[in-house]
Structure formats: structure tokens, C-alpha cells
Image (cartoon, rainbow, N blue to C red):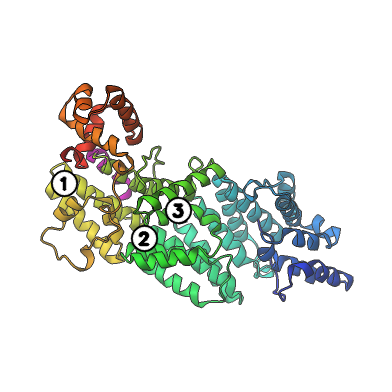
Amino acid sequence: MSIGNTNAVGRVPAAQLREAVQREINQGDTQTALTIVQQHWDRYSSSEPAHLLAAMRALPGEVFLDDAAFILAAEYLQHLIDGEDPDRFVTDPTIVNQALRSGSLQQQLAVLTSTSATARTSGDFRRAVDTATEARRRLTNAPSAEVAAIRMDLPHLALQWGSSLEIADEVGLDVQFEYEEAYRLGMASKQPQIARRSAGQLAWHHSRCGWLTTAEQWLQRAWTIGTPDPRYEAVSHLAAALIHLDRREVLKSSVELARMSAYPIGEYWSAALWVRSWHASTTAERTLLEAEIAAELDRRPAALSSGGLHRFALRAARLRLGYPIDNMIPGRPGEHALAASFEYRRGNFRDATEVAKAATHFEAPPRPRAVALTITAAAALGLRRPAVAAHQFGIARVLIDQERLYSAYDHITPEHFQELTQGLAPEGQLRVGRSAIVGLPPIVSSLSKREREILSQLPTGKTIAQIADELFVSTNTVKGALRRLYRKLNVTSRAAAADIAEHTGLSND
């Protein structure tokens, strides 16, 4: 939710906001009164909604008649004051349609942006993208004089549009364009705080996609422009943590995650869980993170089904913790790389190769492409196709070396890594850190000791009774463990489970 922004005014304490607005109204300066409310929206809408709403109610009634965005803003603040979930605020379509039909350019963009932000936070990503795109279209087609009149609003609007596209998992150039526009316009209009915030979100966007060099450049801008604002600093530290992980600088990544925890994470809550899952190498860390993911899913039950960044990040985190994944969304490189990693860990090398294809084309972002190529190379070894493996790994190495995206090697076993790199220089680009797959075991790591023992017996061909005798347990214990095994491994037959045991080395235990 957001409302327009005009010329800057001095900062007013929340408790004095209504008095400041009323003073300007009494002096006949409605425009300055509006400016006070608009300039303090970001600061107080979440932390002090009651004071902000009181200030808005001091405005003349014609303000709300002239600008539907103020009606929506007042409704949103009341929604927060009533203790309702901000993610479940729904805008009034009648007000929206009225503003779009007869409102000024500023009113139209404010209403569209508010609608987009509300849809984004409620999980309606298609609507979030459509309204953000429509807002950009109206701005592009507007007369230059009207655009010039709202120049101070533009960086705030572009930032919101970029956020809607990003959280909806639109990883194309549109996200980058909106954030870069917000940064450029923020600098040009002498609004360094919005430029700082835009640079931080650009750093995250690029690091998530795997453009690490560019991400580092934006990160430096984010940390040298303006002054730190606790509300928006978390995403910069999250980006820094991911970059350090990719570069095998685990301690530095941990430091950035600690810094991130001092700030509210906001809409990047799922991304933070994903990055933290790379650090969960002990049973205690994994258990804690699993509990946090479960709590978030209880709070946001649609997060795994509604698509967007939350769905991808949660599935990626759960895969690293050993959980199976399913229901891939076709056409998204990140989803294909994730599914390929899952199939590879199960030992389904043909399926891993097939599903990885959509992420190996040159237009895919570096992260999913590097992962898909590395998995394809390792899977080729599993299928005894060394020439194919060498070719695919050669392409992957070029991409990984270019961005120093060493984390792509996490997705294959140490044995396949050693075979692929045999004869190559061991230092520099071919190092595997402690957070590689050797430190983050595949799906079988989620099994209990008894389940692992039974799984290791499946490739031997022994009957259930023979396995029970071997392990000194009852046949019912074996049958119950097998049912749990199939569910955890996401398989439906003993043969499929035995195949996983062989490919993960359990059959040799």
C-alpha cells in the first residue's frame, strides 16, 4: 500500500503528526498538509498507523473526493489498527475504477500502485503484475507536462512496480528496469533514501539470479548512498550473505545473516529462509529451520501453491533440508534447475537431464543455468557418457568461473565432482567448500537410523522377513518403516527406493 509523494518536508514525530497537518489546514495550506501525510507514509504506516490515520482525518473532505488513493490509504490504516493481517487487505474495486476513469495521472498511478502492492502481499501475483504493468503503460503514454508534475513520485512508484514483478517471480528484464528507474530518478530528484533502497533490492535481484559481479556493484552503491534505514536494510545484508555463500566465504555469509537479523525482513522472509538453509549443517540448525518454515506455512498457507518468489524459495530451502519437491512450474529456469537437482539426488539421471534442458539455454540467468549444466554433466557420468559429461562441464565451468558462482558444485556428489575435475587445476575455481553437497546430504539425510538401515537392505533382494531377521526387528516394524520411506522419498515401489539406496551409497553401508 502506498500513496503519492511530493516535495520533501521536515520529519515530524508520529505523536505530533495530526497537529502539524491541522496547523497547515488552519493556515489554508492544504498542499503542505498533504505533503506531510505523503512524506511520512513509509515511516509510520506500519509502525504508527493510528497517528497517521488521525493526521489523514484532519485533511479536508474534498481531498478524499478528489483522490481515491487517500480513501484506500485510510481503509488500509484502519485495517492495521483493527489488528488484521496486512497481507489480507482488499482494495475496493469501485474506488479503483472511479479513479482510473476520471482521476488525474497521479491519482491513477497511486491507485494502480496501491492495488498492485495489496495484490502482491496477499499472494495474487497475476493481478500484482498486471496492475504494475498497466501503471507503467499509463505513465509511458502520459503527456510530458503531467509526468513532470509528479516527478517526485516517480522513484517511489517504480520501486513498488519492481517489487511486484520481483515477488511475483518475474525474473526478466522488467524487474531490473523498474529498480534501475527508481534508483536513477531517486538520484536525479535528490531523494537518496529511495535510491539506497532501490540499489539494495537490485543487489538482491542480481545475486539471486547469479549475476554476482553486478550484484556487488549495486551493493556498494546501496551502502554508500543516503543513511541506513532500519526498515529497508535487511535485503542488502541478505544479498551480501548469498554472494559470500556463492564465493565459498561461509563465515562472512554468517556475519551478514547476523546483521540481517537486526532488521525486519518484510517481503523477503522466504528468501531469508532459503539462504539460511545453506548454513543448516547440524541437526539442531536443521530442526530449528524446519520449525520456522512450518510456522511460516501455517501463517501463510498459500505460499507454496500461489507461485512467486515465496514458492521457489521455500521449495529450494526444503530441498536442501532433505524434503522431496513436486509440481514444477514449466518455463521458469529456476524451477527446472530445482527439479533437476531433486531428480539427480534421487539417482534419476535421465529425468534430471531431461528436466534440466529448459534451464541450460544461454538466455537463462547464470544461477539456474550453471546448476543445470553441472547437474547435466554429473548425470551424464551416471549414465556412462563421459564425452557428454566433459562437454557440459566445460560450458558450466566457463559460466561458474565468470561469476565465481562456486555454489553450483553443491548440487552434485563429491565423487562426480572429483571425476569431472580430474586432471584440472585443483585450486582457484575448482574448490568445494564445507557447505557443498558433502556437508548438505541428499534426501536420505532426513531418514531415521532405522529407516536408513532398512533402505540399505532393499538392493540386496532380501524379503521383508529376511530383513527383519537381519536387523533383529519384527516384520511389522519393517513394513511400517517401508511405508514411511516411500512417503519421505516420494516413491511408490521398492525398486525405486532401492535405486536411491544404490546411488546414494547406502547399499554399501
Whether residue 356 is in magenta: the answer is yes
Q: Which quadrant is home to the N terminus? A: bottom right
Q: Residue at x 75, y 62 (%)?
A: 52
- The boundaries of the magenta stretch are 348-361
The secondary element bearing badge 3 is classed as: helix
Whether residue 333 is in magenta: the answer is no
Q: Nearer the viewer, mark 2 or mark 3?
A: 3
Marks 2 and 3, how far apart at CA: 18 Å
Q: In this view of the protein, can residue 471 be seen by the observer?
A: yes
Considering only vertical position in the picture, is 171 above or below 181?
above
Q: Residue at x 22, y 37 (%)?
A: 501
Marks 1 and 3, how far apart at CA: 32 Å
The crowding category of the residue bearing disc 2, from other C-alpha atoms within 10 Å (few below 14, some 14 to 19, many at least 20), is many
Q: How many numbered discs?
A: 3
Disc 2: which residue: 210
Disc 3: which residue: 273
Mark on residue 381? 1
The secondary element bearing badge 1 is classed as: helix
Name the amino acid, label 2. Answer: Gly
Considering only vertical position in the picture, is 507 above or below 436?
above
Q: Residue at x 31, y 30 (%)?
A: 481
